[in-house]
Amino acid sequence: MKYLFPRQPWDRALVAILVALFSGFCIFTPGFYDGFHGTLAITEEFLPFGFVALGLSVVILTGGIDLSVGSISGLAAVIMAILIKSYGLNTWLAVLLAIGAGGGLGWLNGQIITRLRVEPLIATLSTNFIYSSIAIALAGASPPYGFGPAFGELGTGALAGWVPVQLVIFIVLAIGFSGLITRTGYGRRLVMIGYNRDAAHYAGVSVASVERRAYCISGIMAAFAGIVLASYYDAVRADMGDILLLTSITMVVLGGISIFGGEGGILGVTLAVMILGVLRQGMLIAGFSDMVTTMLIGAILLSSIAIKNLFSSRGFDLGSIIRRLSSLRPPERMAPRS
Amino acid sequence: MNSAATATSEPGHRAKPRPRRRELREVTLLVATFVVVLGVGALRPSFMSFSNIEFMVLSSVVLGLVGISQTFVIITRGIDLSVSAVLGLSAMVFGLLSTTSSMPLWQVLPLCMAMGAVLGCLNGFLVAWLKIPPIIATLGTYSLYGGLTFIYSNGLQVDQVSPDFAAFGNGNLIPFLPVPTPVLALIAVATAAWFVLNHMKFGRNILAIGNNAAAAYNAGISVRRTLLAVYTISGALAAFAGLVFVAYTGSATATTGTGDHVELQSIAIALIGGTAIAGGRGNLAGTVIGSVFLSVVITALVFLQVPAIWYSAGEGLMILAAVTLGARRSSNP
């Protein structure tokens, strides 16, 4: 039993927040607790954010950032829809090709960052707009819709009648990513680059190739999220992914992955996905507008980084908090090392 | 991101003296602007008409103001994505204010700058005191301020402004001199910014922080306060740009600024103008010429009937090109 409970203080705090938030919504928001099955089905609304967050975790662990996830997911969904509708391709083949296209777009990001030596934030900010222009141009005036019931199962289906397919996929992927980061050489190299990029370089790690693969993974996960969204709505829009970016970055950062890289794990990200998802859906059900929810998520993003910066690796005791708050130490480097 | 790789792979590059490139950037941009004007003018003669050239210069004013604020932030190794949201909020608030109340412009102007300064001050606090990376901090405030605009507008939109505003946006301040007031405002702001950056202690502090924040701190510069001031100025200038925008166009919606991706445009202008994304080097003349260049290019795309969806892709490509070429030229990125 001891090992079932998260051991990091940050993760424990997240569990407490999740429980408090969930029970709070169940008690105070009429219509939030809709039976056991209904409540599980709420996860379908926010798990696409979680898929993006998993891919983004890998990039943020290296100390980089990928701002193009939203447009990659929109573009991948549009590519899939066009392959199905205009070329009459088999649905699942089109899905695979679209995920491959997402990987290709992420790989292109990685190439721009490592070969042309452009900072990740500038490179992915630019490609974000380039990809979304391409997506809007491809989608045209009347975006395609209606991909058949079999494809709809991916977004809205349930195994054995009550476990949402999305939830199963998310759990499998989360375990997979956790294994990738903690149990493989590639994962350790990712964390090492984020922790100290120069040390990784001198230890013989091929920094550029590890980074390229990280952006490729992020692109693949973004494309998958776009396809799940397409399946959930049974329609495609080029700007469908625009809402993904802010919430997924918040999920990664709230999950305890340092925005400077090299610190954090997937367990925290999974908990943060649940917290933000419950918060988002709960607020929407309680009647707040999408704008207010987005503002709140922006505020959570800022405060979680601020709290993490104040407490980072210096314990939670009061003395260290006062020292951190009153200290006049020089800021180390303002931007993530670049 | 690549200090290690660069340092080891190109050891010989550093020994060379850096060639004089700063003056070249403005000349290159001016030549490029004239080439675009003449080239498109040859294809579409109406492009060269006086009214169109006046339109292009006027529409570059808003871009230029935001570009100057972005230049200051980028010099400190930061980035400010919230400029577009501040611009939109200011356009909305003061556009609505000009019709609902009869406040004269000279009262609105300081109010607007103060609002922008407060919003920018929050960015500066997040970056300098809470040590949040600028890109994340301003991404968060971008959504905060964008949400505020939606809540404040409450479905309304500005479709006319008071005559006072319209006179500011389109009239000439000095009689007998056919220069619109916004252009004069841009010239004044750019000159002031140039003076601050190159001839005042504060400006040199900004450059020092961008080059090496730790060294600047050890040299006795108050890094936090300087950063706070830089982000505050950025917010105030962005709010002023919003005021100019609403006075000039007479319209504003809840997606003004954020919908046009002004943050992307301002970064593109600053980088095209020769400001180094790695910080420590800024070129305000380049920023002003860059804003004219961008405005000319966008208008040229309109004249050549390129669909509007490709504009932001073009701006993205411009940023990538400017950053890549800049990195090639300077030996120490």
Image (cartoon, rainbow, N blue to C red):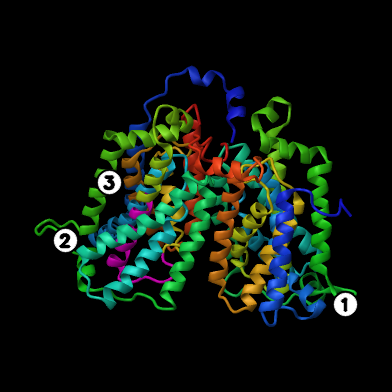
Q: Which residue is mark 1?
A: A161
Marks 1 & 2 on one chain: no
The answer to whether residue B110 is left or right of residue A138 is left
Please tell me whether the stretch drawn in magenta is mainly helix, strand or loop: helix
Q: Can residue B281 be seen from the camera position used here? A: yes
State the SS at label 2. loop
Q: Which chain is mark 3 on?
A: B
State the SS at label 1. loop
Q: Which residue is mark 2?
A: B172
Q: Which residues are magenta?
A: B234-256
Q: Which chain is mark 1 on?
A: A
State the SS at label 3. helix
Q: Residue B328: x percent and y percent?
A: 50, 32
Task: Please say whether residue A159 is one of the residues in the magenta stretch.
Answer: no
Q: Nearer the viewer, residue B95 or A281?
A: A281
In the figure, residue A53 lies in which quadrant? bottom right
Distance of label 3 from label 1 (alpha carbons): 65 Å
Q: Which chain is mark 2 on?
A: B
Which residue of the protein is positioned furthest toward the front in this rendering? A319
Q: Residues within 10 Å of mark 2 (few under 14, many from 20)?
A: some
- Report the amino acid beneath label 1: Gly
Q: On residue B190, which mark appears?
A: 3
